[in-house]
Image (cartoon, grey):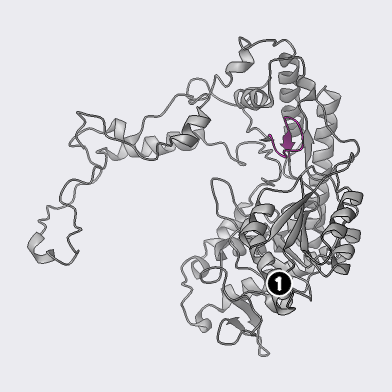
Amino acid sequence: MSLAVSRGLNVAVPLLFESSLPGLCGTRSAPHRFDEAAYDGRLGGLHRCDTIGLPELSEPQVMRHFVTLSAKNYCIDTGIYPLGSCSMKYNPRVNEKVARLDGLANIHPNQPEGTVQGILQIMYELGEALKAITGMADITLTPAAGAHGELTGLMAIKKALSEREERGRNIIIVPESAHGTNPASAVMCGFKVVSVQANKEGTVDMDVFKAILEKYEGKVAGMMLTNPNTLGIFEGEIKNMADLIHEQGGYFYMDGANLNALMGNALVDDFGVDAMHINIHKTFSTPHGGGGPGGGPVVFSELLAPYCPIPKVVKNPDGSYHLMDEADAPDTTLGRVKGFAGQVGLMVRALAYIKAMGAEGLTQASRDAILNANYLQHELTEGGLTAPFEGPNMHEFVLSDHYLKGTSVTTMDMAKGLLDAGHHPPTVYFPLVVSGAMLIEPTESEPLTSLDRFAGDLIGLADKAHGCQDDTCEMKSSPTLTPVRRCDEVGAAKNPVLRWVKPRGVDL
């Protein structure tokens, strides 16, 4: 088993508050006397009368603190990041350079259009590129991330049904293996969710699906389907499902979280899709993780294009660009779904990636992602781990915990063991339909050596697990090489400590 961490440096870093000493400072400014009387009343009695409580440290202390923390970061720049359904691919540095150009980084959304033609052109060209990649008729770039995109697409569906005076259609069909945001978005939009089960191949059971359509005839608003699904399997019946939904008078929403497996290989429009969000922070390489940022543009079919939100960049006959807003938008638009024009910084990075890759490069990236996932699945199953579904997968795959039966080791123990091996663990216990699931997505970024090392370490842990019969096993106490070991996750969720509390006797 390889080891990608340094034991000597792998120590806990104290909080800045814990390192504070009275009198220390990084920069001394000229003395300044605050004239409290001059400001009396201006702050409505809310001015602070006591010390702010910041730690007192020298500049070297502060620098060493944050540099040490940065050295502990695990990120795509340090190793494979195999989180399933996350597409943690490499973020090309040229994208960052482009996004930091003065003319892009130092502009304001309230500037006159004539002074921001460059960013408007970028937004327009990104929209046109994403429409070409998906084959769809229209697009909004403004949604903040995937779940926000889902909500936006469902709002368009709801408005379309309202204009048809079919408000009684309130059922959204969602596969049981769907991302949790799918049913959540549907409920937030006022729909009721009906779950459809999978067959033994891991795809939607068409007999169950047709029975649901029959049971709720006249009530179905639409369906939400991730393709490839969260098991990493392509839903081959997607066009048939979309046609049946349309025959019922509903709309078909596709979750585009896994577009990395499709770009250049298929057009979403050919599937019969009416709306789909695109996670540009996944498929198009913009940085994500740690809670954001994200970007969730939504593409629409001809049927739902009239409801596309604003603002939207349009190209004028003279070649200039205009940000269409409330003043000149069609009456059918949903209006605004986010402040200003959305996550513009990510749009710059996404277009830089698309232009650098080109159509051929995007197609190759998709195929390499599929190749890497299938190779890694083959190596792991040949090494004794178990996959619940046979046959080739797309860009990701899922393992079950069947190989751990008869041992005291769980999927969580395996994930913790990977930390000691120097890897970020995959997504665990999701999707919920697979026992002890481990969802793995290597992306196209990983070379063969990286895949082999990850596979070797995971197989080594599986072999070690077969010698564990009780909780005294070493694997039950992993990780042992990280500054923080196993946290009380239940306790943290029930009683979160969200701020540092000054201990008695400490003066700040």
Q: Residue at x 79, y 76 (%)?
A: 302
Q: Is residue 439 magenta?
A: yes
Task: Kindly indicate the quadrant of the structure image that contains residue 256.
Answer: bottom right
Check disc 1 and report its element: helix, strand or loop: loop
Quadrant assignment for the N terminus: top right
Vertical order, 362 against 445 (above or below): below
| Amino acid type, callout 1 | Arg
Going by the image, does 96 lie left or right of 426? left
Where on the picture, by quarter, is residue 165? bottom right
Residue 348, how many percent across, how many down? 60, 64
| Residue that carries the numbered disc 1 in the rendered image | 167
Residue 152 picture quarter: bottom right
Give the number of callouts: 1
When the figure is inspected, residue 17 is found, relative to residue 268, above or below; the finding is: above
**Residue range (magenta):** 429-440
Task: Tell me where residue 90 appears, x and y as whole percent.
Answer: 66, 47
